[in-house]
Image (cartoon, rainbow, N blue to C red):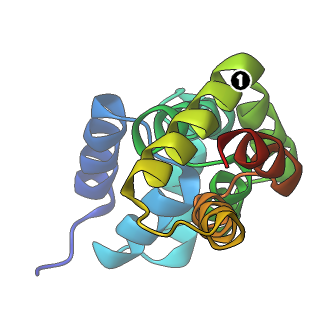
Amino acid sequence: MKPLTYEQALSRAASLCSGSEHCSSEIHKKLLLWGLSPAQAEKAIDFLIDEKYIDNMRFCRAYCLDKFRYNHWGRIKISQMLRMLEMNNSDIDEGLEAIPEEEYQEVLKHVLEQKNRQLKDTDPYIRKGKLVRHALSRGFETHLILDIADDLV
């Protein structure tokens, strides 16, 4: 791929950000991939943030709600993925607070009920262990999992 000029890369990044939410680290990687120097990439990121194409807090909020509602991820998994995207802890906390608590528990209950229907084991101890492991892999908190799993088994 032929390297882009600063103006071309900035235009492409602005177009990308106007179409969907992206965080600054994602766009920074793309700018470097498109052939910009690290200094030019930083300059472009600063411009995109100033012009409100990129807003990491807005990205965190949207990411948290999307991964929760569509992928049924828990808070732990969402926060780990946001840390991998180099987001600030304050932005992550702000995004996680956007998830309604009642809806969070309903989704966890739905995930556990769905998994419970799939299990063929009759031993309640084994069933509960499998339910707990499944919900933990989805990133839900242990104390919430145990409360709901006890009711199901």
Amino acid type, label 1: Ala
Along the viewing direction, whichever of 124 and 50 lies nearer the viewer: 124
Along the viewing direction, whichever of 145 and 100 lies nearer the viewer: 145
Query: Which residue corresponds to mark 1?
Result: 98
On screen, 140 above or below 59? below
Q: How many discs mark residues in the rendered view? A: 1
Q: Position of residue 130 (x, y in %)?
A: 60, 69
Mark 1, secondary structure of its residue: loop
Q: Is residue 94 left or right of residue 55?
A: right
| Residue positioned 43% across, 44% down in the render | 114
Q: Is residue 30 left or right of residue 40?
A: left
Q: Position of residue 53 (x, y in %)?
A: 47, 32
| Residue positioned 74% across, 38% down in the render | 151
| Residue positioned 57% across, 64% down in the render | 134
* Residue 39 visible to an observer of this rendering: yes
| Residue positioned 57% across, 71% down in the render | 39
Along the viewing direction, whichever of 146 and 18 lies nearer the viewer: 146
Q: Is residue 142 left or right of residue 136?
A: right
Along the viewing direction, whichever of 11 and 58 lies nearer the viewer: 58
Q: Position of residue 76 (x, y in %)?
A: 74, 56
Residue farthest along the front direction in this orientation = 122
Q: Is residue 55 left or right of residue 146?
A: left
Q: Position of residue 123 (x, y in %)?
A: 62, 69
Quarter of the figure that contains the N terminus:
bottom left
Q: Quadrant of residue 71?
A: top left
